[in-house]
């Protein structure tokens, strides 16, 4: 077999000086217009099927909901969720926490003027926690009663 000569890829100038200089972290490539175009606006929203199902449950069974109405509500609720979540995230960031909790959402809603909704959600959050506690207890009890 013949021996392959190594490629000299060192830049022009003193190679020793380059080794002593700290390297800059690589700069990420900017997002191109093509990539932005590929990102569908619908990907930012809640799934239309879920929005539609919730809307249908709120009207009489004989009522029809236009596609335009569904898309409008889809966009609005998605924006509302982002609005509330960003306020809650800001609170967490100030408190140096990484996880947004139910109380953070309630705080954000009250801060942004949605106190009436916050009260309703507070009740739902309490019910959810009761259910989770009961479910966890039931699964724990079931696991203890089984022989190994």
Image (cartoon, rainbow, N blue to C red):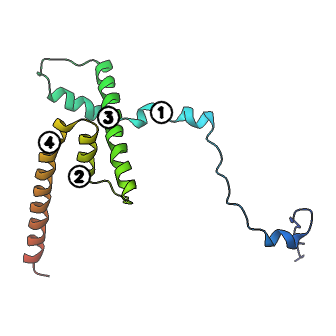
Residue highlighted by disc 4: 119
- Give the mark toward the camera: 1 or 4: 4
Secondary element type, mark 3: helix
Circle 3 Cα neighbour tier, 10 Å, few/some/many (<14 / 14–19 / ≥20) = few
Using the image, tell me which numbered label, if any, was put on residue 103: 2
Q: Residues within 10 Å of mark 2 (few under 14, many from 20)?
A: some
Query: Where 141 sits versus 26, above or below?
Result: below
Residue 40, label in figure: 1
Residue that badge 3 annotates: 80
Give the mark toward the camera: 3 or 1.
3
Res. 61 image quadrant: top left
User: If you read the primary sequence from the N terminus, does the residue marked by circle 1 or circle 4 appear first?
Assistant: 1
Earlier sequence position, callout 3 versus callout 1? 1
Mark 4–mark 3 distance (CA, rounded to whole Å): 17 Å
Mark 4 or 3, closer to the camera:
4
Query: Judging from the image, what secondary structure is the residue with disc 4 in?
Result: helix
């Amino acid at each position: 077999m013949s021996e392959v000569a190594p490629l000299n890829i060192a830049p022009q100038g003193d190679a020793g000086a380059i080794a002593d200089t700290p390297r800059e972290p690589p700069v990420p490539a900017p997002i191109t217009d093509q990539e932005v175009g590929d990102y569908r606006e619908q990907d930012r929203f809640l799934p239309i099927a879920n929005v539609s199902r919730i809307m249908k449950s709120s009207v009489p069974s004989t009522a029809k909901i236009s596609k335009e109405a569904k898309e409008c509500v889809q966009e609005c609720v998605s924006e509302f969720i982002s609005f509330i979540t960003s306020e809650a995230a800001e609170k967490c960031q100030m408190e140096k926490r990484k996880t947004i909790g139910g109380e953070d959402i309630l705080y954000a809603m009250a801060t942004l003027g949605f106190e009436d909704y916050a009260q309703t959600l507070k009740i739902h959050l309490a019910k959810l926690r009761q259910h989770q506690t009961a479910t966890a207890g039931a699964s724990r009890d079931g696991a203890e009663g089984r022989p190994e």
